[in-house]
Image (cartoon, coloured by chain):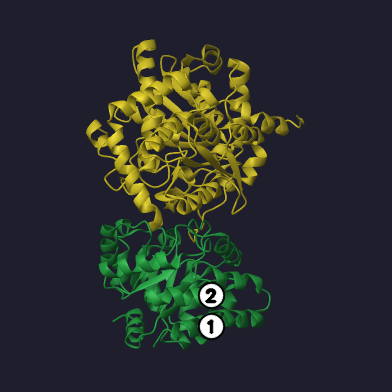
Chain colours: A green, B yellow
Amino acid sequence: MSRIEGVLKTLKDQGRKALIPYITAGDPNPDETVGLMHALVSAGADIIELGVPFSDPMADGPVIQLACERALKHGTSLRRVVAMVKEFRATDPDTPVVLMGYLNPMEAMGYETFATLAADAGIDGILTVDLPPEEADDVAPLFSARDIDPIFLLAPTTTDDRIRAISEHSSGYVYYVSIKGVTGSATIDVDEVARKVAHVHELTALPVGVGFGIRDAKTAAAVGRVSDGVIVGSVLVDTIARHQTDPAALRKALTDLLHPMRVALDDLVH
Amino acid sequence: MSVKLTEEMLKALPDARGHFGTFGGRFVSETLMDSLMTLEKEYLRLKDDPDFQAAFDKDLADYVGRPSPLYFAERLTRETGGAQIWLKREDLNHTGAHKVNNTIGQALLASFLGKKRIIAETGAGQHGVATATVCARLGLECHVFMGSEDIKRQSLNVYRMKLLGATVHSVESGTKTLKDAMNDAMRDWVANVDDTFYIIGTVAGPHPYPLLVRDFQSVIGRELRQQSMDAVGRLPDALVACVGGGSNAIGMFYPFLADEDVQLYGVEAGGFGIETGQHAAPLCAGRPGVLHGNRTYLMEDENGQIAGTHSVSAGLDYPGVGPEHAWLKDIGRANYVSVTDDEALDGFRRLTRVEGIMPALESAHAVAYGLKLASTMDKDQMLVINVSGRGDKDIHTIAQLDGIEI
């Protein structure tokens, strides 16, 4: 059982929902990232999604675009991101880490090399935004062979046939994109998300994480009620941007944002 | 390595997943997959629909003004002293470039699909103008994404788009040029996927775009075959076209791919020189990677981050290239070369002064290389340069280089 499966199973047995924060590695600078990851765990994160910065993040809104620019300005390469996870893993053997990014940096490194380094660093899942399962035949098996979960996206536009097919290619969890749009762009219609996620649950046995548009404890709880986990990204990254020059204030601000979501999710257990 | 291509092989490409060999494909976020699959299905159906084709042909004739002439540049030939130089005059199309062939076709597709809102990216502004033009004619809402750098250097085309009723969105992210305009167009599309049709301007992007743009642009090569037979009773010996994303080049080359005696030359933007790194020549100096929905040759750094590009011509200032070109390069069927900004400017001046034809700076790259190539060929050989667009939009840039305020 992978680390991701283990964590999600434990939570399920407890009737709890996963809190999955996203930050972009190297933002505001590479020296801060590992510390921020530990801070996220202290504030209640069950799994961390760590963004790999890319020069052309086509699926991201302005907040994460700017985070990528900040990270790249400090030379945050994929190799360095992998090293950050290795450092994090040295003191946190339990919290799963999912790398989320675009395909080209992985292709440039070479898939075999990347998969090997990722496994060695203790990376648990890989989510590649611009890699649908149709193009993943050469890539995903390299991850699976090393017990790294390939995680794919589902969208509001995904047909039932594709939901089934994508779930077959995925392990760990599937990531349901709650809105038609880029990251950080719109507020979600909770009823609509609930309806769609319930439908996804009918088509796959995998846990379903929901991301895009979750900004506070209230939306986290509303989405947590219908899913297995909530993914929180842009609102955290925006907080990083606002406190980028003051590390202590930044950690406090992230905690102040994330902890109430943890509490709200755990309040669902009754 | 060179492979003899047969009609049968060509018909099988791209394959069902949009691959040309290892290139092409569909690398997009999940939200767009359903739209792309629907577009593919509908296009493959309409491609052989006589009504659709008749509507397309009629628009090309009556609205674009096709066929575009094949012109023998007699004086240029004499001065160059080599092969006969002929020009395929896409610059004479309505809106001034080959781009309109494709926007006519895609706007027809949008109408058949019932989409009322159109988005497009543009570099030099030619594709933006061609899109705004067909939208004006069909009464469709039009949004054009353009890098703020390009807006500065192509102000005339920006104003044309506005006159045509389009909204021009200035793109401030990344390098503020064509690639970033394409990023923002993709972002808009994800958010408005239900009612919006994305008219991509070149043979790049996710499948089926490289296929359908190539098909729409292939009218260039089909006409050229016929015109060449009519004029000289045989096919040309060499074809030369500029390559940014590569739509005018593939449109010219595609109907000749199985004619192995016809040499094909794609001319990339060498900028300040390939050796400076300041250029936009991924086929000459890049390596395979994935960007904007397809695997192709890219300009990137060792970490897979997309590199900034430079070209005097906004329309060639792009770090990628259509996947079919990437495949043609690897199998050795087409030659990809580059000329520098300075060489292209010389080409512009030469064609202007010797033939009275002012090419777009993009097309001037093909002119510059075509003249070089012609001088190495025999007098009884025939070379055709695709003058993909006219230079009116570049007068400001040229004047500025000459130190003249207009």
Q: Kindly identify the amino acid type of the residue bearing the numbered disc 1.
A: Pro
Relative to residue A169, is residue B158 depicted above or below? above
Label 1 resides on the chain identified as: A
Residue bearing mark 1 = A260
Quadrant position of residue A252:
bottom right
Label 2 resides on the chain identified as: A
Marker count (numbered): 2
Q: Position of residue B328 (x, y in %)?
A: 36, 39
Distance CA(mark 2)–CA(mark 1): 8 Å
Name the secondary structure under disc 1: helix
Quadrant position of residue A128:
bottom left
Q: Are marks 2 and 1 on the same chain?
A: yes
The one nearer the camera, A172 or A97, is A172
The one nearer the camera, B337 or B36, is B36
Q: Horizontally, is B3 left or right of B405 in the view?
A: left
Q: Position of residue A195 (x, y in %)?
A: 36, 66
Q: Earlier in the sequence, mark 2 or mark 1?
A: 2
Q: Position of residue B262 (x, y in %)?
A: 35, 25
Within 10 angstroms of label 2, few (less than 14), some, or many (20 or more) residues? some
On residue A216, the disc is 2
Which image quadrant: the C terminus of chain A?
Answer: bottom left
Q: Horizontally, is A237 left or right of B374 in the view?
A: right
Q: Kindly identify the amino acid type of the residue bearing the numbered disc 2.
A: Asp
Which image quadrant: the N terminus of chain A?
Answer: bottom left
Residues at marks 2 and 1 touching, judged by CB atoms closer than 8 Å: yes
Residue B370 shows in the view: yes
Relative to residue B201, is residue B172 depicted above or below? below
Q: Residue at x 42, y 61 (%)?
A: A129
Seen from this angle, which residue lies furthest left? B8
Quadrant position of residue B153:
top right
